[in-house]
Image: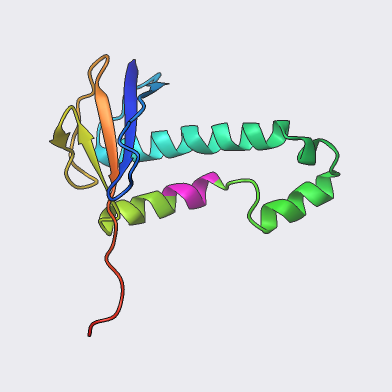
Amino acid sequence: MRVYIQIKQLGKRKCSIEKIPIDFPVPPVNVQGLIEAIVSWQVCEYNERLQQSEVLKYLTQEEVENKTASGKPAAEVEAITNALQSYEDGIFRIFMDDTETGDLSSPIQLKEESTLTFIRLAMLSGRLW
């Protein structure tokens, strides 16, 4: 099943939102499954690009493991945990065809060519005068 992902961060001047296609072999049934599937896909993409970079081509296995410990390749389990926590904390929201998805256990029904919009909410910070 092919759906499209759009990402928007509030407050950014860049107005264009590019659609990124993603294929789900098995469509997720709830918001948590959707986040887990997308984060897993993104971690795999990131790690593949990292493996193809010139830096890692010349490193030994021990050096790659040291880079992993220092945070270079992404760890899938940690990334999923962080994404789920961020969603629960309201750092970002997900809209499926212009309808907000709800909490993590909310059921979703993806359709072919659906559009998922991820909106990163900007937190206000600063001093109170």
Q: Residue at x 83, y 50 (%)?
A: 62
Q: Quadrant of the C terminus?
A: bottom left
What secondary structure is the magenta-colored segment mainly?
Answer: helix
Relative to 108, 32 lies left or right: right
Q: Residue at x 29, y 80 (%)?
A: 127
**Where, by quadrant of the figure, is residue 117 drawn?**
top left
| Residue 35, horizontal then vertical, whole percent | 35, 40
| Residue 87, horizontal then vertical, whole percent | 29, 51
Residue 16 vs residue 40, the one in the foreground: 16
Farthest residue, direction front: 13
Q: How is the image coloured?
A: rainbow
Q: Quadrant of the N terminus?
A: top left
Farthest residue, direction left: 99
**Where, by quadrant of the figure, is residue 19 drawn?**
top left
| Residue 91, horizontal then vertical, whole percent | 30, 55
Q: In this figure, what is the number of numbered marks?
A: 0
Relative to 18, 102 lies left or right: left
Q: Residue at x 40, y 34 (%)?
A: 37
| Residue 125, horizontal then vertical, whole percent | 30, 70
24 to 69, vertically: above or below: above
| 118 drawn magenta | no
Farthest residue, direction bottom: 129
Residue 24 vs residue 115, the one in the foreground: 115
Relative to 57, 101 lies left or right: left
Q: Residue at x 32, y 31 (%)?
A: 16
Residue 124 vs residue 1, the one in the foreground: 124
Residues in magenta, as a range: 76-80
| 77 drawn magenta | yes
